[in-house]
Amino acid sequence: MNKKVLGLLAASAAVVGSTIFAAPARAVKQDVSVNLTVDEVLFLRTFETVELRVSQGELNGDTSAETDYAGTTDGTDQIDLTAPQLQSESTATSIQKSVDELYAVYGNSSVTPTVTIKVNPEGQDLTNGFTEGDRDFRKAVMSVVDESGTISNRDFSELRDQPLQVGGVNLEFNFEDDRGTASAPIAGRYTGGILTVEATAVGNF
């Protein structure tokens, strides 16, 4: 092939190549949103034990102590053991008691937590220490009046680290005898009740 022709072909290729590489690149761009979610941290504080006391007055009984005389003794007489009719004996078979503040919830969220208070299935019955089947056996069956509890009305504005929520609970106790029949309670300490307090805070994120 003629050297002039080869030279022209080479020159043409060089021109076309430079044209290809010199042309501006086609490009697209788009903004991408970036979000960051910080998980919540919750801290729950409760009392370890709730000790409640029920008066005879709360059970429709008389709150006063009673006395009488059995005559005079010369030191050798035996006292009259005829059982008195106790006017102060309770008649009610159930009672409601309030715990104004049972828990406090702290956290790193501004979302008010959801708190539920339930009776643990293993701690529904409080018993008075007698064996079931004994005529003196009594139990107080515990229930929560409202599982969402009650909210404390205390002012926390002066606290540097304010709790997200502070609240309590209203409890109901139904007394039963050894046959499971509703019965006025026998005086004494009833133990074995268990409450479960759970706090959850799921923000809108």
Image: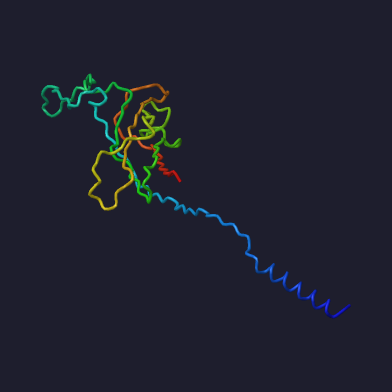
Q: Is residue 46 left or right of residue 87?
A: right
Please identify the quadrant where the N terminus is shown: bottom right
| Number of numbered tags placed on the structure image | 0
> Residue 103: image x %, image y %?
33, 43
At 12% from the left and 22% from the top, the residue drawn is 71
Q: Nearer the viewer, residue 30 or 48?
A: 30
At 41% from the left and 25% from the top, the residue drawn is 178
Vertically, is 127 above or below 29?
Answer: above
Q: Nearer the viewer, residue 109 or 33?
A: 33
Q: Quadrant of residue 7?
A: bottom right
Q: Nearer the viewer, residue 160 or 45?
A: 160
Q: Is residue 162 left or right of residue 78?
A: right
Vertically, is 14 above or below 158?
Answer: below
Q: Is residue 80 left or right of residue 12?
A: left
At 37% from the left and 28% from the top, the residue drawn is 138
> Residue 117: image x %, image y %?
39, 37
Q: Quadrant of residue 170?
A: top left
At 10% from the left and 24% from the top, the residue drawn is 72
> Residue 33: image x %, image y %?
50, 53
- Furthest residue to the right? 1
Vertically, is 16 above or below 81?
Answer: below
Q: Nearer the viewer, residue 31 or 120?
A: 31
Vertically, is 200 above or below 148?
Answer: below
Q: How is the image coloured?
A: rainbow
